[in-house]
Each structure stands twice: as C-alpha cells, then as structure tokens.
Image (cartoon, helix red, strand yellow):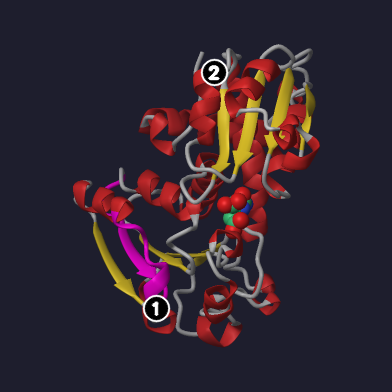
C-alpha cells in the first residue's frame, strides 16, 4: 500500500508512466470509464479548495468510481477535537483511497502513517503539493515537449507557495534546467528548497525584477501571495500586489513562453493576458484532472 506525500515519492520513470497514462486517458476516455467501478475516493479537505478537490472528484467519477468526504474542517469531527490519525483510521473503513488537504505541514504524512489505504497529499500547509506538480508537469510536457534545457521563472510568493516547492523539486531532476526566482525579499524560496537546487547541481538566480527576467524565460510560473499563511495583515497588504503581469510586460517575452499559474488568481495576472496564446493556466487545471486519474489508477494498482 503506497501513499504520496511528496513529489520525490515518484521516480522520474514513474512520472513518465503517469504522463503516458494521462495522455492515453485524453485520447481514449471510454477505455477508462468503468475501470474504478465500485471504488471510493474520500476527499478530506480541512482547507479551502476549488480545483484540487473538484478535479479529484471529477477524476474518480470519470473512472466510474464514487466520492465521499468533506470540504471544510468545521463539518468534520476535527471540529470536536479528533486527531488526524483517528480520522485516517476511520476513513480507511469507508473508502479505498484518500486525498487530503490540511493547513499543517506534515498532516498528510501523519494520515498516511495511520491509514490502511493510500493517502494522497493534496496540499499540507506551506510545505508541498505533489498533485499540483503532476498537473504542472503534464502542462509543460504538452506545451514544451520536454523537461530539460528550460529556463523556468517562478514569481510571487515563493516562501509560502507549496506548489513552487514541489515544482522545483520535480524539475531539479532534469538536465539543463535553470531557475529564475522572482519575489520580494520577504517571500524568497526557503533555504531548504534552495539547498536542493544546489545539491542537484542546477543553477538559480534570485531577483525582484519580473520585467528584467522575462525575456530569457521559457516558462513563467506566477503565484498568488498566500494570505492565509501570513502572521499579520499589514505585511500581506504591503506585499500582495508586488507583481501584476499584463500585456505590456509580455511584449519583451519569448513568443513561445508558457505562462502558468496553479490558480486561484487574485491580481497577479491581468485578465487581459487570458486571451494571449501563451497563457496556459486553465489548461493546467484540466491537466490536473487527467493526472489525478492516472494517479488514482497507479495507487489502486489498476492497470
Ligand atoms: C494552490 C494551493 O492550494 O497551494 N492551489 C491549487 O491547488 N491549485 C495555489 C494557491 O492556493 O495559491
């Protein structure tokens, strides 16, 4: 029985396998329409979500399975003081697989230690978000056709942005990847993540200047300033509009730049950018569903 807590729980070969399955699902949806008949996914969401929870649920329905769960901590026994361990043991009695989001770093790990069914980390605090990275990787594969030799700009809240941490860890494994880390001083990538870049022998630069960094990028991964992780509102208000991508800034970008964002967007990408052919964030949300379908099949051991 296998759980997924971190993107590094997958080998590079397994990521290729998940991508191949997702591409096959896109081409042959009927082949998969009943493959999970009788199986149940539990979505345990202790934090708000639109894409991650609904794409997990849509993924299970499109495989023929069923879904149960809750979408806020207040409607579960967590509100009565139940531990994550007890919740995980209990849900193991009712479902075949769990997708869990929680505001505390390490929560999915604790659930996996106590569940008797696979647990998927759907985001644990400011730590990591492996299934968003699966969506990101399929998007990069479909847009760029490769993972190596890419200059990847990550912009916004690189400190609390868990999707950023997981994506860096995933891309560290491919040759010729360079990172341009664009953020205000206060929201830089944590040193434990930067150490992993160095250990992988990859290059990174840190800058505050999006306009200056843009022309060299193959991928621009924008992120929201993570309001819910700030200790005081004043800091959030000061930093929230640090970057706003608009059509004028994009005039100096490559013609084949891929603009990505895990969403939700607040102000950091103007809606005017949505019609630019380089914008891929809504496709990214769709790709997330296909990769979650592939992941459910892998963890349930269904070929
Ligand atoms: C992200 C998250 O929850 O970390 N959202 C998502 O799952 N697509 C990004 C965010 O909330 O900013």
Left or right: 164, with 190 as reference point: right
- Tell whether position 185 is magenta: yes
Q: Residue at x 77, y 41 (%)?
A: 74
In the rendered image, residue 198, in percent from the top left (x then y), is placed at 21, 53
Q: Residue at x 68, y 41 (%)?
A: 46
Q: Residue at x 70, y 34 (%)?
A: 78
Distance Cα–Cα, label 1 vs label 2: 48 Å
- Tell whether position 200 is magenta: no
For the question of whether residue 232 can be seen, the reply is yes
Q: Which residue is mark 1?
A: 215
Q: Give the quarter of the figure containing the C terminus.
A: top right
In the rendered image, residue 301, in percent from the top left (x then y), is placed at 57, 13
In the rendered image, residue 124, in percent from the top left (x then y), is placed at 53, 42
Indicate yes or no: mark 2 CB to ligand 1 under 8 Å. Answer: no
Left or right: 173, with 137 as reference point: left
For the question of whether residue 72 can be seen, the reply is no
The answer to whether 23 is drawn above or below residue 222 in the figure is above
In the rendered image, residue 180, in percent from the top left (x then y), is placed at 34, 67
Q: Nearer the viewer, mark 1 or mark 2?
A: 2
The answer to whether 110 is drawn above or below residue 252 in the figure is above
- Which residue is at the front of the view, 129 or 177? 129
Circle 2 — which element? helix
- Tell me where the magenta segment starts and ends, as one range: 174-191
* Quarter of image, res 209: bottom left
Identify the mark nearer the N-term, 1 or 2: 2
Q: Which residue is mark 2?
A: 114
- Which residue is at the front of the view, 215 or 228? 228
């Amino acid at each position: 029985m296998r759980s997924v807590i971190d993107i590094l729980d997958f080998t590079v070969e397994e990521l290729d396998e998940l991508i191949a399955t997702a591409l096959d699902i896109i081409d042959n949806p009927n082949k998969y329409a009943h493959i999970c008949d009788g199986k149940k996914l539990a979505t345990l969401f202790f934090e708000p979500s639109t894409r991650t929870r609904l794409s997990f649920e849509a993924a299970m329905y499109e495989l023929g399975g069923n879904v149960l769960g809750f979408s806020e901590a207040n409607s579960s026994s967590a509100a009565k003081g139940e531990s994550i361990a007890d919740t995980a043991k209990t849900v193991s009695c009712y479902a075949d697989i769990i997708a869990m989001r929680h505001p505390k770093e390490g929560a999915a790990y604790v659930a996996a230690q106590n569940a008797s069914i696979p647990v998927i980390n759907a985001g644990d605090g400011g730590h990591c978000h492996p299934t968003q990275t699966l969506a990101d990787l399929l998007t990069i594969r479909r847009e760029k056709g490769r993972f190596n030799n890419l200059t990847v700009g990550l912009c916004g809240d690189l400190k609390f942005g868990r999707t950023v941490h997981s994506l860096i860890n995933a891309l560290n494994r491919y040759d010729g990847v360079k990172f341009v880390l664009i953020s205000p001083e206060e929201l830089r990538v944590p040193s434990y993540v930067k150490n992993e870049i160095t250990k992988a022998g990859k290059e990174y630069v840190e800058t505050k200047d999006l306009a200056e960094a843009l022309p060299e990028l193959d991928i621009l991964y924008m992120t929201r300033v993570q309001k819910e992780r700030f200790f005081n509102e004043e800091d959030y208000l000061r930093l929230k509009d640090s970057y706003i991508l608009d059509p004028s800034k994009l005039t100096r970008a490559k013609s084949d730049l891929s603009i990505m964002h895990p969403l939700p967007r607040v102000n950091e990408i103007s809606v005017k950018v949505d019609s630019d052919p380089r914008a891929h964030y809504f496709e990214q949300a769709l790709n997330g569903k296909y990769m979650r379908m592939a992941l459910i099949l892998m963890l349930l051991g269904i070929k």
